[in-house]
Amino acid sequence: MRDSLIAGNWKMNGDLASATALVDAILAGDRGAAEVAVCPPAVFLMKIGGMLDGSDVALGAQNVCDRESGAYTGEISAAMLKECGCRYVIVGHSERRTLYGESDALVSARFAMALQAGLTPILCVGETLDEREQGVTESVVARQLDAVVERCGGDSLGAAVIAYEPVWAIGTGKVATPEQAQAVHGFVRERLAALDADVAARVRILYGGSMNPGNAAELLAQADIDGGLIGGASLKAADFLAIAQSV
Ligand code: PEP
């Protein structure tokens, strides 16, 4: 039995006042049975880590450097994220892959660094609309997973969370149907099972892409959907809590 995870990816939104107000509301609200995590902008991590201390809401970061320390201007190390109180870190979000040119190799190196520091990476995979229309969704997702397996080994995914995020559904209001999402989640789990059945059975696979209170229950009811990575709807406490309550 896998515990569901509902993680909010706040991206580059808000300010310190809105971030702390959002955390206050999440802490005060009914989070249902799910494990809940928030991934605020990096500059707010230390402050929000303090607010979450002693609660059962986990802290996550939105990215991590692929190096341990040194002359890497603008980057943030895994050790620094740990010091802020992070449990999770998103790696390979499609906005990083497409807007900032992060390759599969770089994503895998970031993933490795997170694991080495004891953070749980949330590895994002997913196809663009063009790739879906060309019928190559599975090969794209397989390539993104295989890059991590090649670098870190199949076991490594057992210490991670995977987020299937069809790029065409992120921030667009277009959501994958429960059947479309389940098909890819099932494919991911089968691919992992071919490497290690135990890892496949325990790894949590989140769906991300315009999840909201209206569509969450149906998506979360699918056999291989173990939670959600939520963008836009995670910025409104009521919506985020409603999604958590749908678990
Ligand atoms: C995301 O960016 O991880 C995401 C799922 O965004 P949204 O929920 O806004 O589509």
Image: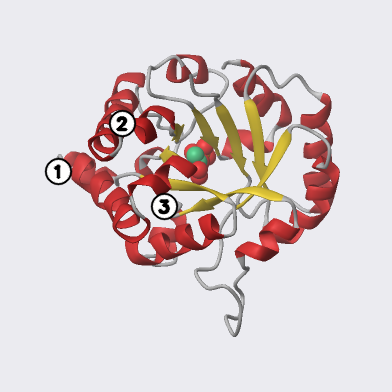
Mark 2, mark 1: which one is toward the viewer? 2
- Asked whether the beta carbons under mark 2 and mark 1 sit within 8 Å of each other, the answer is no
Density class for disc 3 (Cα within 10 Å; few <14, some 14-19, many ≥20) is many
The residue drawn where x is 80% and y is 34% is 55
Give the image location of residue 162, x and y in percent. Answer: 43, 40
Residue 89 visible, this orientation = yes
Q: Which mark is residue 134?
A: 1
Q: Quadrant of residue 231?
A: top right
First reached walking from the N terminus: tag 1 or tag 3: 3
Q: How many residues crowd around disc 2 within 10 Å: few (fewer than 14), some, or many (20 or more)?
A: few
| Residue 94, numbered label | 3
- What amino acid is labelled 1 in the image? Gln
- In the rendered structure, the answer to whether residue 92 lies left or right of residue 235 reads left
Q: Give the Cα separation between the discs numbered 3 and 2.
A: 28 Å
Q: Is residue 193 above or below residue 222?
A: below
Report helix, strand or loop for mark 2.
Answer: helix
User: Would residue 241 appear left or right of 135 to someone viewing this image?
Assistant: right
Crowd class of label 1 (few under 14; some 14 to 19; many from 20; radius 10 Å):
few
Which quarter of the figure has residue 132? top left
Callout 3: CB less than 8 Å from ligand 1: yes
Query: Depth check: 58 or 124 in front?
Result: 58
Q: Quadrant of the C terminus?
A: top right
Image coordinates of residue 210 in percent, x first then y, are 48, 33
Q: Which mark is residue 57?
A: none
Q: Does the CB distance between marks 3 and 2 fall below 8 Å?
A: no
> Residue visible at 29% across and 25% down?
180
Which disc number belongs to residue 197? 2
Which label's residue is closer to the chain start, 2 or 1? 1
